[in-house]
Amino acid sequence: MNRYHFEIESIKKTINLNKYYSIDEVARLLKVHYITVYRLIRFGELDAVKVGGVWRVPGPALLSFLESRHPFNLPEK
């Protein structure tokens, strides 16, 4: 196991499945720039909806995104 496995697991524990996260909140959780989150949404890698003209990421979509990038789910090189 590598350190990313532990980071993903700790992030998954903090996700509220009943919440809609802003792009900034997702960026803080994933420790990336907010533009990176916007690009993930734009390219269809992270599901999101527009609420009042602002992108929101449902908790289940964020959890699904993390699980799809779990080290055990990634293809071997």
Image (spheres, rainbow, N blue to C red):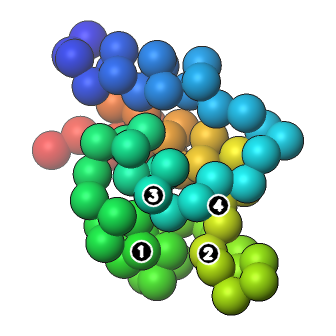
**Vertical placement of 17 versus 50: above or below?**
above
- Would you identify the image quadrant in which residue 29 lies? top left
Assess whether mark 1 and mark 4 are in contact (beta carbons under 8 angstroms).
no
Q: What residue type is labelled 4?
A: Val
Q: What residue type is labelled 1?
A: Tyr
Going 43% across and 82% down the picture, which residue do you hit?
Answer: 43
Instruction: Mark 4 or mark 1: name the one nearer the start of the chain.
Output: 1
Q: Is residue 56 left or right of residue 68?
A: right
**Vertical placement of 7 versus 30: above or below?**
above
Separation of marks 4 and 2 at Cα, in angstroms: 7 Å
Separation of marks 4 and 1 at Cα, in angstroms: 10 Å
Tell me the SS state at disc 1: helix
Which residue position is annotated with label 3? 24
Going 64% across and 60% down the picture, which residue do you hit?
Answer: 57
Assess whether mark 1 and mark 2 are in contact (beta carbons under 8 angstroms).
yes
Q: How crowded is mark 4: few (under 14 residues within 10 Å), some or many (20 or more)?
A: many
Between disc 1 and disc 3, the foreground one is: 3
Instruction: Mark 2 or mark 3: name the one nearer the start of the chain.
Output: 3
Which residue position is annotated with label 2? 55
Query: x and y percent of residue 19 in the render?
Result: 77, 45
Q: Which amino acid does label 2 sit on?
A: Trp
Which residue position is annotated with label 1? 38
Which residue position is annotated with label 4? 57
Instruction: Mark 2 or mark 1: name the one nearer the start of the chain.
Output: 1
Between disc 3 and disc 4, the foreground one is: 3
